[in-house]
Image (cartoon, rainbow, N blue to C red):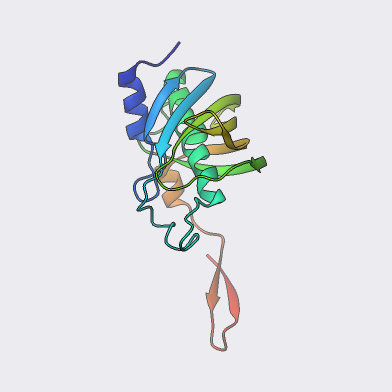
Amino acid sequence: MEADPILRSRILEMVPQRPPFRFIGEILELDEEHIVGAYRFRSDEYFYAGHFPGLPVTPGVILIETMAQTGVVAFGLYLNLLRGKAESPLEDPVTLFTLAEQVEFSGVVRPGELVRVTGRKVYFRGNQIKVACVMTRSDGDEVCSGTLAGKGVPRDKFTGEKRRNHATLVEGGSLQEEGL
């Protein structure tokens, strides 16, 4: 069943990333098998000043993050909503990125360019999702692709988790591990 514009807008608002690290501006299509999102890279994005001075290019890691926010986070939120899973309030999950494989770059994205991300479900089991993603420019030219995965964790479990080991900088500049 195709999600209507109201539901697509609701899912978009549920995506927890916020500026300056939000790279999904609109959800164009959404159903049980795929998602299509769009984002326009603004010329004032914080990373362009240093990547590369005088020749701004969107970093590959940001392109991967853009695919993940659409294909893993937004798509996973929608599939959880369809499933009716409510272990914690749906608006309050943290999606942890767990996998990027076979990522290939075939073009660059410059400031001002609009990209489209299409994600096709590989699997969605429990709280884990795996998606085949492709990013294209508005003219259809492919920029990058890959298989991405993530895991949804309720925010209270994520923030309440105790760290098992913690390294502390001690005198002399070395690290000492502490059990917590």
User: Is residue 89 visible from the viewing direction of this image?
Assistant: no
Image coordinates for residue 102, horizontal then vertical, percent: 69, 40
Residue 121 placement, left or right of 57: right
Q: Is residue 19 above or below residue 11?
A: below
Image coordinates for residue 137, horizontal then vertical, percent: 50, 34
Quadrant position of residue 164 = bottom right
Residue 114 placement, left or right of 130: left
- Residue at the (42%, 61%) spot, across then down: 49
Image coordinates for residue 44, horizontal then vertical, percent: 35, 53
- Residue at the (36%, 23%) spot, across then down: 8
- Residue at the (41%, 37%) spot, across then down: 39
Of all residues, the one furthest to the top in this rendering is: 1
- Front residue of 51 and 155: 51
User: Is residue 136 visible from the viewing direction of this image?
Assistant: yes
Residue 178 placement, left or right of 5: right
Q: Quadrant of the N terminus?
A: top left
- Residue at the (47%, 38%) spot, across then down: 69
- Front residue of 179 and 23: 23
- Front residue of 84 and 34: 34
Of all residues, the one furthest to the left in this rendering is: 6
How many tags in the picture?
0
Quadrant position of residue 22 = top left
Q: Is residue 51 above or below residue 88?
A: below
Of all residues, the one furthest to the bottom in this rendering is: 172
Quadrant position of residue 171 = bottom right
